[in-house]
Structure formats: C-alpha cells, structure tokens
Image (spheres, helix red, strand yellow):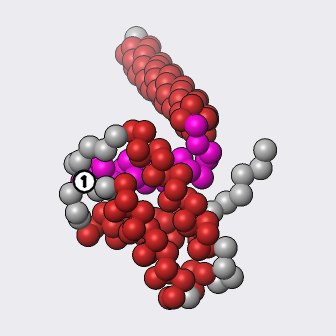
Amino acid sequence: MFSFVVIYLGLLLYSYWNFQIIYDTFFRVVWFISVLEDFSNEIIDLYQDLKTEMTSFADMGINYEEKAFYDILKSLSVKYDFSYPEDKLVELAKRAKQEVDSVASFPAWNQRDDIKAELQVKLILLLAEFGYPPIANDDVFKEILEQAENFKKYQVELVD
C-alpha cells in the first residue's frame, strides 16, 4: 500500500510539474502574441504617419524639399519658443530653398569656404527680410545655416 501511495504522489507531482510547464509555456506564447500584435500595430501606425507626412506638403502649396525647410524653421520656433505666422513661414521656406539651390549649384560648393560664406550671407539677409526670428538669436541663425548645408549635402532624389 505504501508503494502505491508513493507512486500515486509521484504521478501527482509529475503531473503538476508538467502542468506548470504547459501553463508557463501557454502564458509565454500568449505574451509573445500580445507583444507581436503591439509591434505590428506600431509599425502600421508608423507607416500611416509616414504616408501622411510624405503628402502633407501638397496641402501647403509647397514641394517636398520646401517642406524640409519649413520643418526646420518650424522646429526652431518651437525649440526657441517664439511664434511666427504660418503663411510667412511657408513663403520663407520656399525662398530659403531657392537661395540654397542657387548656391549649391556650384561644384564642390560644400568644400569651398567662399561659397559657404555666400550662402550664409544670403540666408541671413533673407531671414532679416522676413523678420525671422522675431527676436535676434545667434543660435537660431547658426542652426538654420547648418541645416541648410546638411539638407543639400545629404539630399536624396525622390523617385515617383
């Protein structure tokens, strides 16, 4: 009788141990599926946001490159906590892109200090013409110049 009880208890422990393994495995699979679903939803949301961003410039009456300058100017107004009228910001972005394109058309423009200095002067005069930023801030000018150079240096051609 004693051996029967020992065998029975052994089977119960074995069953309980197997149950724990199955139980743990089941909840790990459920957790993994939940994480995978969250990840998939995040990717889909990111794709939708990217798709929206890639077409947002059309509603503003500007092209993709001008939108890049608009985003630079807008982010600086947020970063340095000043307001600037939207319509003037769009027009400034268009003109800034034109100025950068005119200077960046020279070969090796980003390696020549004289051409970079010309770009700086043109952008500073343009910003002054538009009253951007409303309160003079050397950091804003510096960041705009850096972003303008980086924009042309790392520009990627869009394929339709």
Residue at the image position 41 percent from the left and 46 percent from the top: 89
Q: Position of residue 156 (x, y in %)?
A: 67, 60
Task: Inspect the magenta stretch and tell me whether residue 146 lies in it.
Answer: no
Q: Which residues are magenta?
A: 61-80
Per the picture, the main secondary structure of the magenta-coloured stretch is: helix
Q: Using the rendered image of the protein, determine whether residue 110 is visible from the camera's viewpoint.
A: yes
Residue at the image position 55 percent from the left and 67 percent from the top: 100
Q: Which residue is mark 1?
A: 134
Residue at the image position 34 percent from the left and 70 percent from the top: 142
Within-10-Å neighbours for mark 1: few <14, some 14–19, many 20+: few
Left or right for 115, reference 7: right
Amino acid carrying label 1: it is Pro
- The secondary element bearing badge 1 is classed as loop
Q: Quadrant of residue 131?
A: bottom left
In the foreground, 104 or 125? 125
Q: Position of residue 49 (x, y in %)?
A: 53, 33
